[in-house]
Image (cartoon, rainbow, N blue to C red):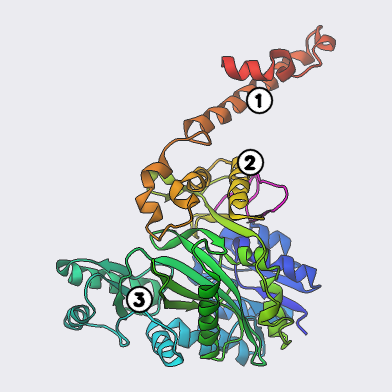
């Protein structure tokens, strides 16, 4: 049985994994770069070790250093989280060769599903619907033009080895084929070290729906239902919810069965996600498989009642899944908002810096997975996501209202964040009616960036007022210390001036 886990990651996901390990009585080892010395995951772990400079290529992607720390500390398992080494087949294989348990799938499963062209072929063989497109790598402009002529515009050019929106280009016109191909291949090479791409038909008005699966090493595979992930910006998810508001019970079973078939096709074990593109008529097509934990996994945990990290560890311990498909149910509705340190009004530019004040929301049905704290400086070297805010409600409407309340209570100063932008999403008619597509943000950008009751200058005004009152209070107390009237001035500045009146008059 696993006794000590090295978490080969950083930020909120590292903390989230360590929390489950603590509940299971498992010791944890953190690794960190020089930029992350003061990060929360370093403080939370039982042990922590520096593995290199800030660039991830010299730290979190350095297999040799991570393996070395695992061996020196006696860690018998490594959890990769998501990103970094989580989908590197070579890392899974390296762990196996070193006698360290990799809390994730086999190198074969990662390699097969990680290469999008191979994954498409595998899904076709398994009878899972795929988007019409190429099943071979496209390397020349001539091949690209021929393939697009056969498929028909519009098409998506996608990196074979990629994900996360990198190495992707939408082509709607013939004149854009060559430049889009060059751009996609260049970005793919820079991001993944592999410039091969494939081409598939672009589905108009697509919904992005994914199914969570769990599979043990004894041939048992289940799905934990779907997540709606269509609120995206530049192919990056921003808000997710479960269940999907467009799903029917019949289509849920059909897609769930397809997700299980996809996982079984590669003899999968562990937690994974089968992603689908769904059109307005609920026709669905395999998009890709993420052979790891997803950022949005907490909403599935909330509506199904299963700790996915715990199940990952149990599967790595060679245990049998404790439930069958018929045992699983969805209860209520959950929504996740990804909170970024970025400036929405300045083209969503990352905004790292010092956290001066932090107030996280609390209350029934609220969960906040984050890693920042007051006095912490967000480094410039990594993804700008600083937290995930998850809420649950008995209905979708209740969940939306709870998320609005939670976002209202969520206060971060010192850096710009996406909190107000997320609040506007909750108010957008297109989101509230539930029938939105992956074009939601671009189609509603003016509304989402407009000032509302929640934010904009009004929010800044109240923050400024709070600073002003605190400043006056501080100087008032300094004067009171040396004043002969001090005994008569015990009440706070709020009481002396009247809090409501002071705000109104200022």
Horizontally, residue 489 falls left or right of residue 380, namely right
> In this picture, which residue range is highlighted in magenta?
358-378
Give the residue furthest to the left: 175
Give the residue furthest to the right: 487
SS of the residue at dot 2?
helix
Of the numbered discs in the image, which one, if any, rests on residue 159?
3
Of the numbered discs in the image, which one, if any, rests on residue 409?
2
Residue 457, horizontal then vertical, whole percent: 47, 31
**Quadrant where the image shows the N terminus:** bottom right
Q: Which residue is mark 1?
A: 470
Q: Residues within 10 Å of mark 2 (few under 14, many from 20)?
A: few
Horizontally, residue 370 falls left or right of residue 240, namely right
Horizontally, residue 504 falls left or right of residue 326, namely left
Give me the C-alpha separation between circle 2 and circle 1. Answer: 20 Å
Q: Nearer the viewer, mark 1 or mark 3?
A: 3
Considering only vertical position in the picture, is 379 above or below 197?
above
Whichever of labels 3 and 2 marks the residue nearer the N terminus, that label is 3
Considering only vertical position in the picture, is 314 above or below 435?
below
Residue 274, horizontal then vertical, whole percent: 51, 77
Horizontally, residue 398 falls left or right of residue 487, namely left
Q: Main secondary structure of the magenta part?
A: loop
Whichever of labels 1 and 3 marks the residue nearer the N terminus, that label is 3
């Amino acid at each position: 049985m696993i006794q000590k886990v090295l978490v080969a990651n950083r930020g909120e996901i590292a903390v989230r994994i360590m929390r489950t390990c603590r509940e299971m009585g498992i010791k944890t080892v953190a690794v960190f770069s020089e930029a992350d010395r003061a990060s929360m995951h370093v403080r939370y772990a039982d042990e922590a070790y520096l593995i290199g400079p800030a660039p991830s290529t010299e730290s979190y992607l350095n297999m040799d250093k991570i393996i070395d720390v695992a061996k020196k500390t006696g860690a018998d398992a490594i959890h990769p989280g998501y990103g970094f080494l989580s989908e590197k087949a070579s890392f899974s294989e390296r762990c196996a060769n070193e006698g360290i348990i990799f809390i994730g799938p086999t190198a074969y499963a990662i390699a097969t599903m990680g290469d999008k062209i191979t994954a498409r072929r595998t899904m076709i063989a398994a009878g899972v619907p795929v988007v019409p497109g190429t099943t071979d790598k496209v390397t020349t402009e001539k091949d690209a033009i021929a393939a697009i002529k056969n498929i028909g515009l519009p098409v998506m050019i996608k990196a074979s080895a990629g994900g996360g929106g990198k190495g992707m280009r939408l082509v709607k016109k013939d004149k854009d084929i060559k430049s889009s191909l060059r751009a996609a291949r260049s970005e793919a090479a820079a991001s993944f070290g592999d410039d091969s791409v494939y081409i598939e038909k672009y589905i108009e008005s697509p919904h992005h729906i994914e199914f969570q699966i769990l599979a043990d090493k004894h041939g048992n595979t289940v799905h934990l239902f779907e997540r709606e992930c269509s609120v995206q910006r530049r192919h990056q998810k921003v808000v997710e919810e479960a269940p999907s508001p467009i799903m029917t019970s019949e289509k849920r079973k059909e897609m769930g069965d397809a997700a299980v078939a996809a996982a079984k096709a590669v003899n999968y074990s562990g937690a994974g996600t089968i992603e689908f593109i769904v059109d307005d008529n609920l026709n669905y097509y395999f998009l890709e498989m993420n052979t790891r934990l997803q950022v949005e996994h907490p909403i599935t945990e909330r509506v199904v009642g299963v700790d996915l990290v715990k199940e990952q560890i149990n599967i790595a311990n060679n245990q049998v899944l404790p439930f069958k498909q018929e045992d699983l149910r969805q209860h209520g509705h959950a929504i996740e908002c990804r909170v970024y340190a970025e400036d929405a009004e300045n083209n969503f530019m990352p905004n790292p810096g010092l956290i001066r004040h932090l107030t996280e929301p609390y209350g029934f049905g609220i969960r906040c997975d984050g890693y920042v704290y007051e006095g912490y400086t967000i480094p410039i070297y990594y993804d700008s996501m600083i937290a995930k805010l998850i809420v649950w409600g008995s209905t979708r409407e209740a969940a939306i209202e709870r998320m609005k309340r939670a976002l209202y209570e969520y206060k971060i100063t010192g850096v710009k964040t996406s909190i107000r932008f997320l609040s506007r999403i909750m108010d957008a008619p297109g989101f509230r009616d539930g029938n939105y597509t992956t074009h939601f943000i671009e189609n509603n950008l003016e509304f989402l960036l407009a000032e509302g009751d929640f934010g904009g200058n009004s929010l800044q005004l109240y923050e400024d007022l709070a600073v002003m009152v605190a400043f006056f209070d501080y100087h008032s107390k300094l004067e009171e210390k040396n004043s002969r009237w001090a005994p008569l001035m015990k009440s706070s500045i709020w009481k002396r001036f009247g809090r409501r009146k002071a705000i109104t008059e200022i």
